[in-house]
């Protein structure tokens, strides 16, 4: 989320002296965000509240922290001219009260949602939970309410969060589509500079992050920064990114794909963007 600040003034491209460190934090945010509903990265159980402040920083907090009442919005820092305050809480995308509250705080807030294929997202979400609680039931048994009837358990958060069209609806009652940017989690891996180019344009920033800042690390399977800030060494995402996902039966994945298809199509229509998950 990128509220332009209490005054609601959007920074103009010309007045955008965003420092490298800010960009680095921004990149890290986008990284861990995946997710986020990637947005919000709705990319995982990561759709719990994560308050990672970025620029002109919003209030921190543990994973369970986050605005629960109007008073907590006061934790957003004062934003000076030429600054952008960013707040990254993936769970907002799927939190019923969030659109009205954020709109009440600032109608001009720009919203960035990072989304990825909801099937992969569900497996990634499960993988993360599994890494913390190795005794949880199998992905298959959590996915189905009734396996033989193929009935998907939509109350399981790993499944529920991937219903992007459903989660987007309330946001569109409070914000125009033009104030939202949907970042592809897949392209963030295959073309990070391209996706970040869209982000920079959306925020009205000069394009500072380009292809030349990245290289692809084959071992990691992710793009990395050629140089970390203040160092000549490369910087890659942490160990928890790119974890191996457990093998899931093809039939289960097929059923999930069928299940999500209509929701994905609706999401493409709503956003005017085809994310290519059903191709
Ligand atoms: N920058 C960037 N680009 C592309 N993909 C990214 C990025 N950052 C995180 N991810 C992927 O998003 C998934 C969830 O990551 P999170 O940071 O939210 O959670 S986690 O703690 O790493 O599990 C998790 O997906 P999987 O690794 O497929 O499970 C991360 O790898």
Image (spheres, grey):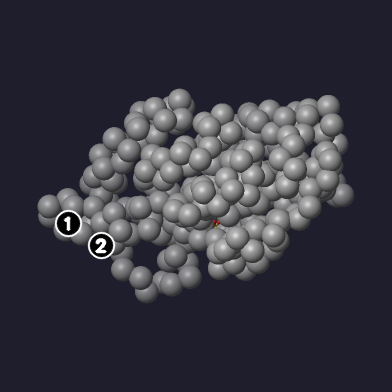
Residue 1: give x, y in percent of width and height.
62, 46
Q: Nearer the viewer, residue 277 or 165?
A: 165
Give residue 169's quadrant in the image. Answer: top left
Q: How many other residues sit within 10 Å of disc 1, few (<14), some (14-19) or many (≥20)? A: some
Q: How many other residues sit within 10 Å of disc 2, few (<14), some (14-19) or many (≥20)? A: few
Residue 141: assigned label = 2
Residue 28: give x, y in percent of width and height.
68, 50
Give residue 81's quadrant in the image. Answer: top right
Residue for point 82% across, 34% down? 16
Q: Nearer the viewer, residue 211 or 27?
A: 27
Residue 112: give x, y in percent of width and height.
58, 40
Residue 96 is left or right of residue 31, and the answer is left
Q: Looking at the picture, does residue 264 appear above or below residue 245?
A: above
Q: Looking at the picture, does residue 205 appear above or below residue 145?
A: above
Which comes sooner in the sequence, label 2 or label 1? Answer: 2
Estimate the spatial distance between the alpha carbons at disc 2 and disc 1, rounded to whole Å: 8 Å
Residue for point 16% across, 58% down? 146
Labels 2 and 1 touching (C-beta < 8 A): yes
> In what quadrant of the picture does the C terminus appear?
top left
Instruction: Confirm whether residue 255 shows in the render.
Output: yes
Disc 2, SS: helix
Residue 278: give x, y in percent of width and height.
34, 32
Q: Looking at the picture, does residue 168 appear above or below residue 237?
A: above
Residue position marked by numbered label 1 in the rendering: 147
Q: Nearer the viewer, residue 239 or 266?
A: 266
Residue for point 83% across, 38% down? 82
Disc 1, SS: loop
Answer yes or no: disc 1 within 8 Å of ligand 1: no
């Amino acid at each position: 989320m990128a509220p332009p600040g209490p005054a609601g003034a959007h920074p103009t491209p010309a007045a955008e002296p965003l420092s490298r460190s800010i960009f680095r934090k921004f990149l890290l945010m986008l990284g861990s965000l995946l997710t986020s509903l990637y947005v919000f990265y709705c990319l995982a159980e990561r759709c719990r509240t994560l308050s990672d402040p970025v620029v002109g920083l919003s209030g921190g907090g543990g994973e369970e922290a986050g605005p629960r009442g109007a008073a907590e919005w006061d934790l957003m820092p004062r934003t000076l001219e030429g600054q952008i305050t960013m707040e990254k809480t993936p769970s907002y995308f799927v939190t019923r009260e969030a659109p009205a509250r954020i709109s009440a705080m600032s109608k001009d807030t720009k919203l960035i949602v990072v989304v990825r294929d909801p099937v992969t997202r569900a497996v990634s979400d499960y993988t993360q939970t599994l890494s913390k609680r190795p005794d949880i039931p199998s992905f298959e048994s959590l996915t189905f309410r009734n396996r033989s009837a193929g009935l998907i358990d939509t109350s399981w958060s790993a499944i529920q969060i991937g219903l992007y069209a459903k989660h987007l609806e309330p946001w569109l009652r409070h914000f125009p589509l033009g104030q939202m940017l949907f970042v592809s989690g897949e392209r963030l891996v295959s073309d990070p500079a391209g996706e970040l180019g869209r982000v920079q344009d959306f925020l009205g920033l000069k394009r500072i992050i380009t292809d030349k800042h990245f290289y692809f690390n084959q071992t990691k399977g992710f793009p990395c920064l050629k140089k970390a800030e203040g160092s000549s060494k490369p910087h890659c995402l942490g160990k928890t990114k790119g974890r191996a996902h457990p093998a899931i039966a093809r039939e289960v994945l097929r059923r999930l794909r069928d299940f999500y298809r209509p929701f994905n199509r609706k999401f493409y229509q709503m956003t005017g963007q085809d994310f290519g998950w059903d191709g």
